[in-house]
């Protein structure tokens, strides 16, 4: 590094080397780093959540270590170097410069001595043994994570596998009748051996349990990977002109399309396709994922679009394609379609009206009395105005003015004791 800044690495990646040079004075290090070299012309403050194997200082300035984590080996090469060790930093072995003692170069030695396990390889009796675990950065780490460009698939990122075997099981959430196997037990017979680079499907409402086992199948460690909970249930794409695909990572088992999906609406360029009956549709499988291919006449592959998908169980997403969220005409078209459609509930209609309002509002986070109000009285009033003045309310600016006028009228009704009848 030649300037102040931040260096971050994923928990499952080890950065080989970071050099802090020139006139750098502030560095934020996050992640696992093998070697850090400090040779700056200025005093340096190092912060961040990091574990460092080797930190070598070759500077005549003061280096402040305010990191949260472990430094396995801290070495000072310059006899004029001094170091400050923060409250959350633990040192495995501290090597002072030749001819110097730790007390001479650690400026806060008596406050920090309990955070140094060894000095020049000799155990420090003042070391706080409760910090020993913090120095053990070689624990097995693993997680299941998404595969870019391959919907529904994950891979396992892991560190410190050693010569052991990694296996995994897929567990259905809320359906577990027995507790997870524990360390020292045999790995479940259904566990699948994982090799680096393997990719596999994880269905919705399932989680991955990752086991580190020895050659005899005994569990040495295990990790429940919860990070996948926010993943999308489906992926909707315009594959080409006139064709839209819906891919789902719902485990469909023997369910027909109509047992999974009840409605699908697609909006683009003044056109809306509404499919409400899926009895004659069937699943195909693309890359092992259940896929529904729909022929939607006049749909273009590159135009801003919006879809609403409704599952048979009642839940369903709305999403934009081709930057449709920035397309004013599309949003206003959908808003009017929603006035009388299946999405006529306050939630969907109100959300779209609010998006259009905020799109043109330079100060979207002003007083709560401004903007779209989600109570039923306001919603009914907005809808009434949109139906009555549809011809004039065809721009976001005009709709924003309408919302403000309606809000002012409703507030005047609330605050005027003499008023008892709405003038809408």
Image: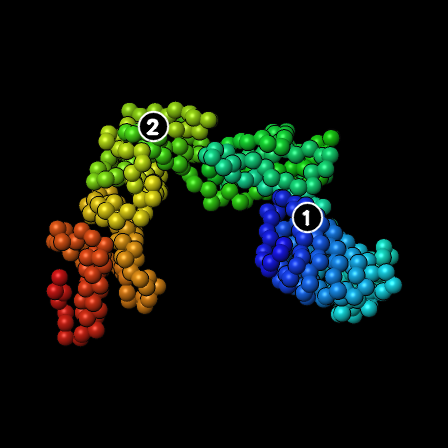
Pick whichever, 145 or 210, lies toward us.
145
Instruction: Tell me where residue 285 appears, x and y as whole percent.
Output: 42, 25
Q: Is the residue marked by circle 1 packed among few (<14), some (14-19), or many (20+) residues within 10 Å?
A: few
Q: Residue at x 17, y 75 (%)?
A: 417
Mark with earlier residue (2, 1): 1
Instruction: Tell me where residue 248 appears, x and y as whole percent.
Output: 41, 34
- Rendered position, 12 above or below 126: above
Q: Nearer the viewer, mark 2 or mark 1?
A: 1
Q: Residue at x 66, y 51 (%)?
A: 18
Residue 17: give its label: 1
- Rendered position, 274 above or below 58: above
| Residue annotated with mark 2 | 293
Q: Residue at x 74, y 61 (%)?
A: 59
Q: Quadrant of residue 309?
A: top left
Judge left or right: residue 407 versus residue 185. Answer: left
Pick whichever, 220 or 66, lies toward us.
66
């Amino acid at each position: 590094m030649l300037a102040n800044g931040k260096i971050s690495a994923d928990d499952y990646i080890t950065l080989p080397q970071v050099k802090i040079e020139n006139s750098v004075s502030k560095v934020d290090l996050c992640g696992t780093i093998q070697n850090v070299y400090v040779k700056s012309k200025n005093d340096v403050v190092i912060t961040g959540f990091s574990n460092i194997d080797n930190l070598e200082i070759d500077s005549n300035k003061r280096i402040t270590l305010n990191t949260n984590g472990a430094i396995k080996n801290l070495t000072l090469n310059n006899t004029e170097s001094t170091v400050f060790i923060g409250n959350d930093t633990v040192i495995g072995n501290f090597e002072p410069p030749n001819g110097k003692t730790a007390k001479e170069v650690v400026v806060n030695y008596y406050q920090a001595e309990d955070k140094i396990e060894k000095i020049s390889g000799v155990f420090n009796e003042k070391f706080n043994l409760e910090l020993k675990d913090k120095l053990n950065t070689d624990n097995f780490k693993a997680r299941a994570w998404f595969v870019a460009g391959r919907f529904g698939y994950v891979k396992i990122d892991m560190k410190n596998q050693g010569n052991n075997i990694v296996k995994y099981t897929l567990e259905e959430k809320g359906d577990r009748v027995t507790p997870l196997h524990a360390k020292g037990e045999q790995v479940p017979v259904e566990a699948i051996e994982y090799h680096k680079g393997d990719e596999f499907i994880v269905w919705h409402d399932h989680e991955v349990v990752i086991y580190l086992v020895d050659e005899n199948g005994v569990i040495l460690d295990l990790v429940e990977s919860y990070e996948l909970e926010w993943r999308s249930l489906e992926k909707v794409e315009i594959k080409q002109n006139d064709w839209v695909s819906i891919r789902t990572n719902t485990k469909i088992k023997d369910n027909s399309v109509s047992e999974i999906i009840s409605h699908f609406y697609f909006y683009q360029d003044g056109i809306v396709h509404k499919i409400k009956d899926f009895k004659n549709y069937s699943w195909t499988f693309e890359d092992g994922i259940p896929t529904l291919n729909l022929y939607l006449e006049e749909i273009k592959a590159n135009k801003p679009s919006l879809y609403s998908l409704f599952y048979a169980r009642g839940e369903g997403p709305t999403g934009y394609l081709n930057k449709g969220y920035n397309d004013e005409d599309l949003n206003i078209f959908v808003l009017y379609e929603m006035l009388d459609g299946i999405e006529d509930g306050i939630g969907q209609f109100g959300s779209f009206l609010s998006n259009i309002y905020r799109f043109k509002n330079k100060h979207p986070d002003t007083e709560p009395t401004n903007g779209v109000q989600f109570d039923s009285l306001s919603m009914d009033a907005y809808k009434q105005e949109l139906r009555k003045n549809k011809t004039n309310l065809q721009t976001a600016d005009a709709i924003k003015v309408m919302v403000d006028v309606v809000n002012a009228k409703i507030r005047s009704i609330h605050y005027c004791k003499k008023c008892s009848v709405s003038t809408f």
